[in-house]
Image (tube, rainbow, N blue to C red):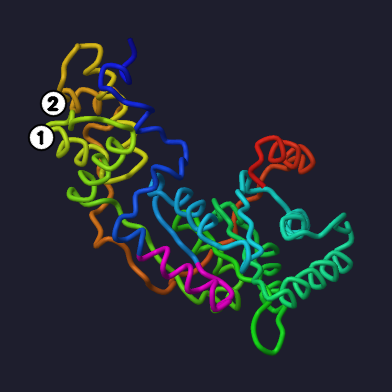
Amino acid sequence: MTYLDFFELSQEPFSNAPVSRFYFNSAQHSQALTRLMHAVSYMKGMAVLVGDIGAGKTTLARRMLDSLPEAEYEAALLVIIHSGITANWLLRRIALQLGVENPAQEKLALLSQLYQRLLQIYEAGRKAVVLIDEAQMLETREIMEEFRGLLNLEVPERKLISFVFFGLPEIEKNLKLDPPLAQRVAMRYRLEPFTLESTEAYIKHRLRLAGCPRMPFEDGALAEVHGCSGGSPRLINTVCDNALFEAFLARADTVTAPMVEQVAENLGLKGKEPPPAGNGGQAQGFGGAAKAPAPKPRLDLAEIDRYLEGLGKL
């Protein structure tokens, strides 16, 4: 017997894999998605969603991609997995994702190909949108300048391409590497940690979708999960998954607060400063000066290509 059998679950309720079926449409996630969809619907050019580690940015990015009708959008999601990528490599990836066949190696030829493809998309009555996950990895001025250049591709009625960045708050610093690009950010939203109420609703939501016939967490246990996770969805998943397993090992029908406390201690979460409680999300502007990033080690971009193609991420 597994803990899934013990709690009569049809699947893992607290996996940290970005499973779209388990998407939790909290009030702030709904507001964030509404704002991002507005930005791309009117081809505003650049929108940014930031949040701390484990806040649910990747899940929201995938949700947004699924929400863009194929009849209206030529949309792509790029996941940046290394901070050492070059501007030319990124341009070729964007071109490939938008349907450019055999992107040129030479930059001017590549930009011409991309412009012609964007015109084709526009003339077909569709909108080109590229979502960039882990965008804080884009750490060079050269890359920021390339995004500004792409946003300058337009027709009299509108821009030909829109970008949405998803990433850690360091995105702000990176955008400031090219001040004219920072000024082109049409919308910015920040995901805040869950409140206690949102944490409880999130846990119940995932248990329900996993087929759980009853609520195995005591009220005190729910409060303890929120306290030790700081309202971070990723940590909530990790703590709850471990707590259910420990309850199964003890053959206990209910997860208690002491069980969660012990799990948190085992995971090294006890005594850590939790993220500050937010107001459920903020739409705001940018500020602060940018500093040039430290040099990054060289990497094999061809190897990165092969890795991403194997994962099917790009």
- Left or right side of 222 for 209: right
* Residue type, numbered disc 1: Gly
| Quadrant of residue 69 within the rendered picture | bottom right
Q: Is residue 171 toward the left or the right of residue 150 in the image?
A: left
Give the camera-side residue of 192 and 115.
115
Q: Nearer the viewer, residue 286 or 229?
A: 229
Magenta residue check for 81: no
Percent x, y of residue 90: 72, 56
Who's the residue at 69% across and 42% down the image? 297
Q: What label sits on residue 220 in the rendered view?
A: 1
| In this view, 300 is above or below 140 | above
Q: Position of residue 203 (x, y in %)?
A: 26, 40
Seen in the picture, residue 77 relative to 150 is either above or below; the reply is above
Vertical order, 232 against 9 (above or below): below
Which kind of residue does numbered mark 2 sit on? Thr
Dot 2 falls on a residue whose secondary structure is: loop
Per the image, the residue denoted by label 2 is 256
Which is more toward the observer, 116 or 232? 116
Which residue is at a point 73% across and 74% down the rendered structure image?
Answer: 124
Magenta residues: mostly which secondary structure? Answer: helix
Mark 1 to mark 2 CA distance (whole Å) = 7 Å
How many C-alpha atoms fall within 10 Å of the one at disc 2: few (<14), some, or many (≥20)?
A: some
Between disc 1 and disc 2, whose residue precedes? 1
- What residue appears at the point 18 percent right and 48 percent down from the top-left corner? 196
In the displayed image of the protein, which residue is found farthest to the bottom? Answer: 156
Q: Which residues are magenta?
A: 31-47
Contact, CB < 8 Å: mark 1 with mark 2? yes
